[in-house]
């Protein structure tokens, strides 16, 4: 242990005299600040957009109350039917949204729940796909800086962890001392990790704090993810240095590793998954849904017509029987279409499960996933919103059915008690299971590399 | 202190060292002479435990190097042809680091400075970065480490190659002091005359084999040169 401490101390002293390191850290901090600013700007825009949607429902209700106020005593307005109540479930950006835009642009963030409408409740949304750079690498947010730029910074600072000494002949003096190469490389890696990751993590947390992402638990989770991902890259640099005898070899190997791990492997894996478990066609699903829906509605219309003209009860109910019939028809339609929807969702879920498990073998993807989850811009949160919005739609339908059963029209005061949508965040917040799994995957990859260093140690003693 | 018994190293079909038997006792300087590729450096690397022998054993201070290389290196010092040090650190800082690695008992700055002085380094150079050091000054840091470690075994690989005559003479003087202290020294060199001058035993190597072993005092410089050339001519 004292040997490890001695090596670490020595390497710290050397690192602190390295003139390039401060510039690398400044470069990272500058890019991180820009990324966080970009993320904050996006979060602000999204928050404003969501607020406009939410205000739409609030304004709708306020308008109804005004209409009630204008009614003459004893009047029964048509708009008091519960089926005309506006509901607008929305998914607001999380507190840590400036960290990562992630998958947030690929999923809807608002729904329009009409109690008598069909399941197509989510607002059409537009992703900025005009910019090819955005399409290729996503937004330039802080997560992008961490996943793509951080490895380059770390590689630039550690690619010659041991190869430089081999190149300059210092290794001969070092390996002839009673110290194991494993301890030596561990000490070197540890000192570089301290010198590089400490300011990098602090810079990351500082820019996030300034950008408004101030959840302490989430900031701790970000620090852990950056530390784990950074440790992975330093372990990789150590492994490269076991075998590279020249700094140029080590630099080339480091560059190739970055390209493979950050760019090529995720793209290749995605392409492979596309072949093995292709994404179900949204177009085909929509077409099939519409065709089946039209058939059902046509059959229902024909059945109504076959019954002849509607007989109005005496006394006439507040809510017409025709409307009740319409609600029943919708329930039948929902039940009939359910298997089609279920098959589509199962196909999507199967593909997501494959992608989710493969991320564990890709440290860059696991890191992006962890940051997305902490930021609340991950697919699971978006899907959870969809599921919660769908569940809320059922709540509104049940609420409406109950009023139909009671033949109860809405009053102005009822608007204080209508169902309200409130998005439930995943339990455990920033330390949710997905983040812990990602962290475990990144750490396991780092440990695997460390084991490679230990196994290949003999190659590092070649002088 | 230092012995090789049937030490053999092959790289594929190439036999770099072929059944080397060698003993270097305390207070002895054993000079290995031979052309490039004769097996001198391979011998040293095997004693350092940086290569695995194909067969045979290498013993340092009674420790089988390949069974416990760390224990074998504890009281051993290796000085390569060019003592490369950390340029961004001072001579004293370099010595302190290598003393840490070498598990030197007394690593106090005072002791390390005393070692540098004993090795002949000027005091004004202690706190200067070694990027300003000459080759001779770097070799002195190496010797200072030997002093600090109280090394019982010194392995030197062409240590005076490229040194000017004065620096070379100073280095050999330091070596003699280590010998007098009881260190066993194995030195690979091309310098026949210095070998005869400082060595107690001279071994002539060719194609991985130790061809001749001579007490240094028993041959004149001219005889040694003649023998060396004769061996090399046989090789050709």
Image (spheres, coloured by chain):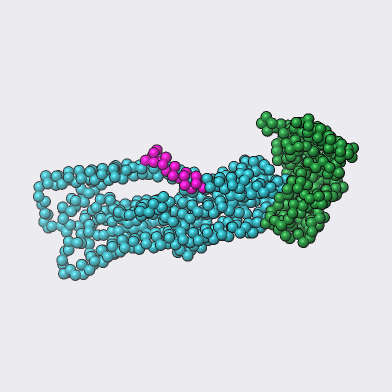
Chain colours: A cyan, B green
Where are the magenta residues, as a range? A258-278
Q: Is residue A123 magenta?
A: no
Q: Residue at x 14, y 44 (%)?
A: A302
Q: Quadrant of the C terminus of chain A?
A: top right
Q: Is residue B122 left or right of residue A98?
A: right
Q: Residue at x 80, y 47 (%)?
A: B151
At which x and y percent is residue A57?
Answer: 28, 62
Whether residue A449 appears in this view of the structure is: yes
The residue closer to the viewer here, A232 or B205, is B205
Q: Please, which residue is most extreme toward the right here?
A: B218
A156 over B60 or under it: above or below: below
Query: Magenta stretch mostly in which secondary structure?
Result: helix
Q: Residue at x 72, y 55 (%)?
A: B94
At which x and y percent is residue A188?
Answer: 63, 51
Query: Residue A335 is drawn in which quadrant?
Result: top left
Q: Residue at x 50, y 46 (%)?
A: A259
At which x and y percent is residue A291?
Answer: 22, 43
Q: Is residue A296 left or right of residue A200?
A: left
Query: Residue B28 is drawn in which quadrant?
Result: top right
Task: Give the mark count.
Answer: 0
Q: Is residue B127 left or right of residue A272?
A: right
At which x and y percent is residue A397?
Answer: 26, 53
Whether residue A205 appears in this view of the structure is: no
A243 over A409 or under it: above or below: above
Query: Residue A89 is drawn in which quadrant?
Result: bottom left
Q: Is residue A339 left or right of residue B5?
A: left
């Amino acid at each position: 242990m004292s040997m490890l401490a001695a090596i670490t101390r020595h390497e710290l002293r050397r690192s602190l005299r390295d003139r390039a390191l401060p510039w690398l850290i400044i470069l990272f901090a500058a890019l991180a600040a820009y990324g966080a600013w970009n993320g904050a700007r996006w979060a602000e825009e999204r928050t404003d957009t969501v607020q406009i949607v939410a205000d739409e429902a609030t304004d709708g209700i306020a308008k109804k109350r005004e209409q009630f106020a204008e009614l003459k005593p004893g009047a029964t307005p048509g708009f008091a039917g519960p089926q005309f109540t506006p509901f607008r479930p929305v998914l607001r950006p999380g507190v840590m949204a400036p960290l990562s835009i992630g998958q947030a642009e690929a999923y809807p963030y608002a729904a329009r729940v009409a109690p008598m409408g069909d399941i197509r409740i989510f607002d059409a949304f537009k992703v900025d796909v005009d910019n090819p750079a955005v399409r290729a690498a996503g937004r330039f947010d802080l997560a992008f800086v961490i996943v793509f730029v951080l490895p380059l910074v770390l590689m630039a600072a550690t690619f010659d962890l041991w190869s430089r000494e081999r190149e300059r002949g210092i290794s001969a003096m070092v390996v002839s001392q009673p110290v194991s190469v494993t301890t030596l490389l561990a000490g070197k890696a540890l000192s570089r990790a301290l010198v590089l990751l400490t300011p990098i993590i602090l810079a990351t947390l500082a820019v996030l704090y300034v950008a408004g992402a101030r959840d302490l638990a989430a900031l701790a989770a970000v620090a852990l993810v950056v530390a784990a991902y950074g440790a992975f890259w330093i372990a990789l640099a150590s492994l490269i240095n076991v075998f590279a005898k020249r700094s140029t070899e080590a630099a080339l190997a480091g560059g190739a590793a970055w390209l493979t791990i950050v760019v090529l492997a995720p793209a290749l894996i995605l392409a492979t998954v596309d072949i093995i478990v292709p994404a179900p066609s949204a177009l085909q699903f929509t077409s099939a849904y519409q065709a089946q829906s039209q058939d059902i509605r046509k059959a229902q219309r024909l059945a109504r017509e076959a019954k002849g003209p509607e007989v109005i009860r005496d006394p006439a109910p507040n809510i017409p029987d025709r409307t009740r019939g319409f609600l029943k028809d919708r329930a039948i339609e929902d039940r009939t279409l359910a298997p089609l929807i279920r098959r589509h969702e199962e196909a999507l879920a199967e593909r997501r499960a494959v992608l989710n498990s493969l991320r564990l073998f890709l440290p860059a993807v696991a890191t992006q996933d962890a940051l997305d989850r902490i930021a609340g811009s991950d697919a699971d949160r978006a899907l959870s919103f969809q599921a919660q919005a769908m569940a809320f739609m059922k709540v509104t339908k049940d609420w409406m059915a109950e009023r139909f059963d009671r033949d109860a029209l809405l009053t102005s005061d009822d608007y204080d008690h209508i169902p309200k949508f409130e998005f439930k965040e995943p339990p455990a917040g920033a330390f949710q299971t997905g983040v812990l799994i990602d962290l475990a995957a990144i750490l396991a990859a780092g440990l695997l590399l460390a084991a490679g260093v230990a196994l290949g140690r003999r190659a590092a003693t070649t002088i | 202190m230092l012995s090789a018994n049937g030490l053999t190293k092959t790289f594929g079909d190439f036999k770099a060292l072929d059944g080397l038997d060698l003993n270097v006792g305390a207070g002895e300087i054993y000079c290995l002479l031979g052309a490039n590729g004769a097996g001198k450096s391979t011998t040293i690397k095997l004693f350092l435990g940086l290569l695995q022998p194909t067969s045979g054993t290498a013993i340092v201070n009674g420790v089988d190097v390949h069974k416990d290389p760390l224990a074998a290196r504890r009281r051993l010092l290796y000085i390569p042809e060019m003592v490369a040090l950390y340029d961004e650190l001072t001579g004293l800082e370099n010595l302190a680091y290598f003393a840490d690695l070498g598990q030197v008992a007394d690593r106090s700055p005072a002791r390390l400075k005393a070692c540098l002085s004993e090795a002949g380094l000027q005091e004004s150079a202690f706190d200067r970065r070694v990027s300003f050091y000459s080759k001779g000054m770097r070799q002195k840091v190496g010797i200072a480490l030997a002093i600090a470690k109280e090394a019982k075994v010194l392995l030197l690989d062409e240590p005076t190659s490229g040194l000017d005559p004065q620096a070379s003479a100073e280095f050999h003087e330091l070596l003699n002091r280590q010998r007098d202290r009881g260190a066993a020294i194995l030195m690979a060199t091309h310098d026949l005359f210095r070998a005869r001058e400082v060595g107690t035993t001279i071994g002539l190597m060719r194609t991985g084999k130790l061809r001749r072993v001579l007490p240094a005092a028993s041959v004149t410089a001219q005889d040694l040169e003649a023998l060396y050339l004769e061996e090399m001519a046989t090789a050709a």
